[in-house]
Each structure stands twice: as C-alpha cells, then as structure tokens.
Image (tube, grey):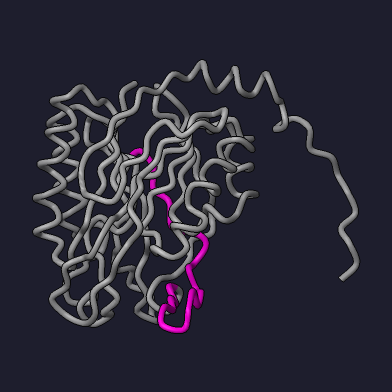
Amino acid sequence: MKAALLQLSSSDDPVQNLGIVRGMMREAADQGAGFVLTPEVTNCVSSDRAHQAAVLALQEDDATLAGLREEAARLSVWLLIGSLALKTGDADGRFANRSFLIGPDGAIRAWYDKIHMFDVQVSQTETYRESAGFRPGDRGVVVDAGFARIGMTVCYDVRFPHLHRTLAQAGAQILTVPAAFSPVTGAAHWEPLLRARAIETGCYVLAPAQAGLHPSSTGGTRRTYGHSMAIAPWGEVLMDAGTEPGISFVDLAMDNVAQARARVPALTHDREFTPPDV
C-alpha cells in the first residue's frame, strides 16, 4: 500500500482549508496513493473560542467532513482525516477533537476522540489549555481497513505508551498520530516519541503534521513544528517532510510488522507486578 501524508498549514477558515486538502488528495491519488492521511485539526487551526464557535459545526452538519468523504469516494482511496474540530452540543460548549477513518466508498469506518488533552506550560510565553476548549474522549479504537488494522490516536496521545501498546495488543499494525505539535516540544521530543511507539509495538507509525505559521483572521497566530513522519516497525525513520506544506509518500509492507514482532516479541511478554507504594 502506498500512503500519502499531507503536511498542511491550515488557517482558521474551514472553507479555504477544504479546498486545499481536496486538491492535495487528488494529487496524491494521481501519484498512486491508496491511503491518504491529513493532520490534526485539518479544518481549522485557531485558539479563538468565539471564532471556533462561529465557524465549526456538529459532525452531521460539518462541510469539511462531507467534502472529504465525497473526495475519498471519488478517488476511491482510504482517508485518515487526522482530526476535525467539531461542535458537540455539550452543555459547557466544549468541542471534540475527532479523527476519522473514511473508506474508499466515502463511508465513515471509524472515529476516535483524542483522549489526552494538551494542558501544558512549555515556556513563560507558551501555554496551552486544550481541555478548556475540547472535551477528552474515553475509548481506544482499532479498525480493520482490509490492507491493515489501524489504531487511531492524536498528537499529545503519543506521550502515553500504554495507549499505543493496548492498541497493538488489540491487533493494530499501523498507528496513526496526526498532530499540530508545538515547535519547542517538537524539536525536543517528536521524533524520539514516534520512534519509541513504533519500536515498542512493532507497528508502522504514520504521523501527518501541521507546519509553519497558520493564517488567522482573529486573535493571535499559531506556529507548528511540521516534520510529518513515517516510522517503520523496527524503528527506522522512513520519511521526514521537513517544515513546508506538501505531500510525502511511503510504501507500507505489512510483512515488516510480523517480522519486527517475531524478532522481539515484547507484546507477548507482559507480566503482572505489584506497583510501588505511593
């Protein structure tokens, strides 16, 4: 299977972003990709809650989801929408950060809400409180896409190895980690974390990312790290997209998953133990 990772610099305008992604999907399919992946918050990069409330929609009404499903069916490709920011109808007004796997018929085959919220103070001037605007999910997802079983995660989830181990032990052969990573934490941790998750699980790790300075019509602008990556089950970096928007390709061979796990069958070596006293 030939996979295409789309590296975007999404703005806070979902209509504009949809047009860009549809064009990139067509280019990827023209070059032979059967599996296309987009980054986290493909539809809207914004920290302005009022703007988000004005431009975002419920899942059933979301134009980006409808448009990308239509494009996947037109191109007959599998599509991982890294995530969409969506309204939920929750009483507190928080949104969902929701990843979708779309089949080549345009049907939603699975969806996953990001579990771990990015609530951190990276520096004196860079603070994130994702949980203020987004509500966390509470379920892991593995879905059979025919060519592979896919375990779905999003961005900050990458720091929680037990999630990825659980997905692999549930049958995942590919782990998806769409992201909009901070430049500071990205430079320090992005590649080591992705490689560790691949090595620990014997999975391919596919991580399409947002990159660069994101155009904003309201509030402050945001910058993300880029460096979309594909990691092999043995831990090799197969592809690094750098810092500019674009399309990167990688060939996936599922036999490599079985070979890596046969060499080091760590997924079968769990032992019960008594935790330390707190």
The foreground one among 106 and 14 is 14
278 over 270 or under it: above or below: below
20 over 130 or under it: above or below: above
Q: What stretch is highlighted in magenta?
A: 109-130
Q: Where is residue 5 in the image (x, y as percent from the top left)?
A: 29, 38
Q: Position of residue 146 (x, y in %)?
A: 40, 23
- Quadrant in the picture for residue 46: bottom left
On screen, residue 62 versus residue 141, left or right, reads: left
The foreground one among 105 and 265 is 265
**Residue in view at x 47 percent, y 37 percent:** 205
The foreground one among 124 and 262 is 124
Instruction: Examine the structure image and report whether residue 8 is included in the region drawn in magenta.
Output: no
Q: Position of residue 98 (x, y in %)?
A: 36, 56
**Residue in view at x 25 percent, y 42 percent:** 6
On screen, residue 81 versus residue 216, left or right, reads: right
Instruction: Examine the structure image and report whether residue 121 is included in the region drawn in magenta.
Output: yes
On screen, residue 101 versus residue 277, left or right, reads: left
